[in-house]
Image (cartoon, rainbow, N blue to C red):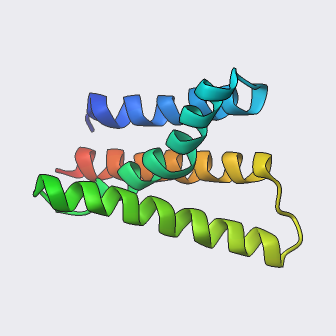
Amino acid sequence: MTLAKRPTIILGLAAVVLALLTLVGLPTPLQTVAAVAVLILLPGRALAQLTPVTDLALGTLLVLALGLATLTAVSTAMFYLAVWSWQACVISMGVITILACIARARQEAAS
């Protein structure tokens, strides 16, 4: 069994670091960038790399679509369960990113 490729590891670590920085608090412009990354871009990228899409334009669109769809599903579920908070949403999206990275690492190890 081989280790995961570097981009997968970096993506997982970025999810952890940016989620923690978002929760701790940053200056407003940095907080916005970190929140967008944790809530949309990182989960979208982690989920998109599980697919066999190789086209750059389609891959970029897939990152945004998967990120927004996942955020919508998580936020809606939290709202209906009456447990929504922005902190819980950040943590949930970070966990989804990490789980998708683990799944990708398993794919990489199997090939």
Picture mark count: 0
Residue 63 visible here? yes
Write the residue at 72% across / 74% down: 77
Picture quadrant of residue 76:
bottom right
Outermost residue on the top side: it is 27
Residue 72 on image: x %, y %: 59, 69
* Residue reaching furthest to the right: 82
Residue positioned 49% across, 63% down in the render: 68
> Is 14 left, or right, of 110 in this rendering?
right
Q: Residue 42, percent across and down?
A: 45, 44
Instruction: List x then y, in percent, for residue 5.
Output: 26, 33
- Residue 92 sits above or below residue 73 on the image: above
Q: Residue at x 54, y 34 (%)?
A: 33
Tell me where residue 93 appears, x and y as whole percent.
Answer: 60, 52
> Which residue is farthest left?
55
Q: Which of 111 and 101 is in front in this view?
A: 101
Q: In this view, does 61 lie to the left or right of 25?
A: left
* Location of the N terminus (image quadrant): top left
Image-based side of 43 in relation to 96, left or right:
left
Left or right: 93, with 106 as reference point: right
Instruction: Please determine whether, in this image, residue 84 is positioned above or below residue 43.
Output: below
Q: Nearer the viewer, residue 8 or 23?
A: 23
Residue 55 quadrant: bottom left
